[in-house]
Image (spheres, rainbow, N blue to C red):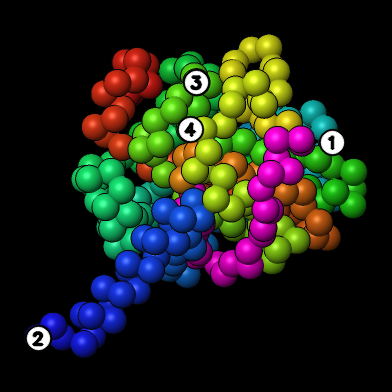
Amino acid sequence: MINPKKQLLQNKNNKILKDFLENGYVVIKAINKNDFYELKNSVIDRINIKIKKKIFTEKNIKQYHKLIGGEEEHKKIIFSDRYIKLNSKIKNAISRNSIINLITKKYWGHNRFVIKWIGSSLKKNQIRNNYCGYRVSRPVKYNKFDTAGPHCDIHVGGRISSDKKIMITAWIPLEGFTDKYTLQLFKGSHHKLHPLNKIKKRTNTVSRIFNNNYLKKFKKSRIKLKPGDAILIHPNLIHGGGENFGKYSRLSVEVRIYNIINMIKYPISLKG
Ligand SMILES: [Fe+2]
């Protein structure tokens, strides 16, 4: 007879896996409190380095929109190299997370993955192992629209892809946890093969932003999270475009978990 505790855990895990496959996302406890503050502080340090001023702290980062010098300074922070290196504790917490391992094993057929940051271009400095991306979003009340439009993460490095097993994204909020702030999710949209002509045109790389008419088909939602939580996102799930309706600035990171086996099909520059 199976141990009741084990059975309970198995049922819980089956439900999480089912939710991920059905909805295209699931919430997990990704990092503990200490790691959460370390992660938050390393993003803040990076921001201070980029503007060459020590303005921001763990306490005042939510007032980013008031303290930042202006648009030029903001651009320095968000437009290039918006990434940080994960320390080994955080890297291990994510790599050993039981839910991430369960989903990859059951969905990909193996759990051989690597944490990697690949920016929207194939430039060498945009591909980094054990790095994650960050984003700052100022409140819309201040007429600031810093959120990335609705997109899927599947088009790695700006190249069109249909490989639904190429990666999983872990979105971790560092400031702003209620539904006024968190990532907007288009539940179940990962089941569709999104037609490329529904994507808005952009000149430099493949645009990933979907047009509003196409988005009407899907139900939008935003969920309340806690510090240390992550939303695991299927690469074909439409997400983003969730403006910051709160009074404070939002800060978040995106950790990309790449399927090592499927990366083999990608150009050498992306394999890194
Ligand atoms: Fe994304």
**Who comes first in sequence, dot 2 or dot 3?**
2
Q: Which residue is mark 3?
A: 160
**Looking at the image, do the residues carrying marks 1 and 2 touch, with CB atoms under 8 Å apart?**
no
Q: Which residue is mark 1?
A: 70
**Who comes first in sequence, dot 1 or dot 2?**
2
Q: Determine the secondary structure under disc 1.
A: loop
- Residue 228 picture location, percent across and down: 50, 65
Q: Which mark is residue 1?
A: 2
| Residues at marks 4 and 3, CA–CA distance in whole angstroms | 8 Å
Amino acid type of the residue that numbered disc 3 sits on in the rendered structure: Ile
Label 1 packing within 10 angstroms: few (<14), some (14-19), many (20+) = few
Q: Which mark is residue 154?
A: 4
**Who comes first in sequence, dot 4 or dot 3?**
4
Q: Is residue 23 left or right of residue 199?
A: left
Label 4 packing within 10 angstroms: few (<14), some (14-19), many (20+) = many
Q: Residue at x 55, y 50 (%)?
A: 188
Cβ of mark 4 under 8 Å from ligand 1: the answer is no
Q: Determine the secondary structure under disc 4.
A: loop
| Residues at marks 1 and 2, CA–CA distance in whole angstroms | 65 Å
Number of numbered tags placed on the structure image: 4
Q: Which portion, as a residue range, is magenta?
A: 212-233
- Check the image and name the residue furthest to the left: 1
Q: Residue at x 32, y 15 (%)?
A: 268
Amino acid type of the residue that numbered disc 4 sits on in the rendered structure: Ile
**Who comes first in sequence, dot 1 or dot 3?**
1
Q: Residue at x 69, y 17 (%)?
A: 202
**Looking at the image, do the residues carrying marks 4 and 3 touch, with CB atoms under 8 Å apart?**
no
Cβ of mark 1 under 8 Å from ligand 1: the answer is no
Residue 79 in view in this figure: no
